[in-house]
Image (spheres, coloured by chain):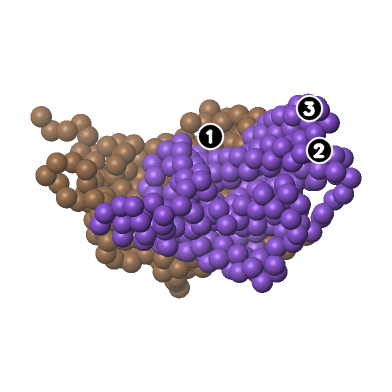
Amino acid sequence: MNTVWSLAKVVVLEMVRRKDFYVLFILTVLLTLTAASVNLFNDRSIVRYLKEICLLLIWLSALVIAITCTARQIPAEREHRTLFPLLAKPVTRGQFVLGKFLGCWLAVGLALASFYLFFGLVSATREQHWPVLNYLQAAWLHWLMLGIVIAFTLLGSILFATPSSNGTICFACAAGILLLGRHLNKVALSLAEPLQSLLYTAYFVLPHLEIFDVRELIIHDAGLIRWDMFALATLYAAAYTAFFLFAAWLAFRRRPLN
Amino acid sequence: MEATVSIENLRVEYSSRDLGESTKVAVNGLTLRVGQGEVFGFLGPNGAGKTSTMNVLLGFVPPTSGTARIFGVDVREPIARQRIGYLPEQTYYYKFLTAEELLRFYAGIFGIPRPETEARIDAVLKLVELDHARKRQIKTYSKGMQQRVGLAQALINNPDLLILDEPTSGLDPIGRMQVREIIQRLKGEGKTVFFSSHELGEVETVCDRVAILHQGELKTEGRVSDLLKEHSANLEQIFLKLIGYPPLP
């Protein structure tokens, strides 16, 4: 575990010392505060729009941070040749993949904590209440979803040649699943065979990232998510993350480093 | 006595991208032993198979056939790398870390306890003369300093075997002399050093034994003094003769 933890710490330090997170955080803050300064007809529902804008920016920023941070990890290790002194130490390829995953996930978790804290502050100043537990549930589910994204981006960084192509593919996949994932079965119904079966298979095989998107519940101040459903979503995310990490390890395990 | 490095009939093949050629043989039937406390020079022109052999020793590439062992342990086992230090050629270490943080990171991988880690960091940074720059980010280092921080990371676990891939490549004369002094100091401490280099004068000064590889095959192996006596020439002349340079018209 020492090895995995040491690898993860370096990834977290990298994110803390790079500008990516700060740029996206400041952009989110500026856009949200600009939106907050608009007050049309003293409309109370304007707060909902504000929350919606802020959460949308958080979702976009977190996705960008997660994918860009993860996509460059293994290619950068190869390009700078740091992979060689690292794997010349008693580090297994499995530990390497796991360490990179843990580092990216923790780094994104830190970023997410800052974003949700800002969201909480904006929401509290406008609504004079702070449903901490609801926000924690939303942030946790969001973090789990990003865990799946990080795991498949890590797999992509082993399979695809460059970080930019991997980043673009992963971003398109994640955005595609988030926007269209829940409708795939309905679209499949309207298609002829064999496309129908193909799309149905994709519907059941792809990770449904959209189930972790509980922004509507936060915007409309709905109650807490049932804890059994919450635990099930956690297990669902853990299973997909483990699957992608296992695939990444399989792909990386026998790859010659020369 | 168990050899520190033992290679038996090693063959390494890569799939070739050239038309009409399915595989490229990088190393062919190499057998080699390096004893404890020796400084062993591994020589050969570019493409001779030196780096491929090192890659096998470090577990980066699986051997096509034959075996390679370090301290008697098959190199495919990660534990074989617990007592070695490796300095690759031209590595650009994590530029956002300071030398101290980099060494702490590698020490963490070896599971070295915290107080011992700090003592090791102090010792290796003094050895490579980077103590004054320990809190500076690596991105501010010169090429020579980066090479020395590389040497420091290779020494952090106080290894019994050091594998150095062209440790003086790209360094100025002072940098080269410093690295040479460090190797000699390590030899004095009883460490085994296995290194490749194109600087034959340097090899002649530092090494106890050498092996010359050409086109994947071992051309000669022996004590430097014996080779010089046998051929009545310096190492550079012996090297050129063995690889067939200049080529016959």
- Residue A258 placed where, x, y %? 37, 48
Position above or below: B142 against B31: above
- Residue B64 placed where, x, y %? 27, 61
**Mark 2 — residue?**
A44
Q: Amino acid at mark 1?
A: Arg
Q: Colour of chain A?
A: purple
Q: Pointer 2 indicates a residue of which chain?
A: A
Q: Pointer 3 indicates a residue of which chain?
A: A
Residue projecting furthest to the right: A128
Q: Colour of chain B?
A: brown
Viewer-nearest residue: B48 or A45: A45
Q: Which mark is residue B176?
A: 1
Residues at discs 1 and 2 both on one chain? no
User: Which tag is nearer the camera, tag 1 or tag 2?
Assistant: 2
Q: Amino acid at mark 3?
A: Leu
Distance from disc 1 to disc 3, alpha carbons, whole Å, reads 72 Å
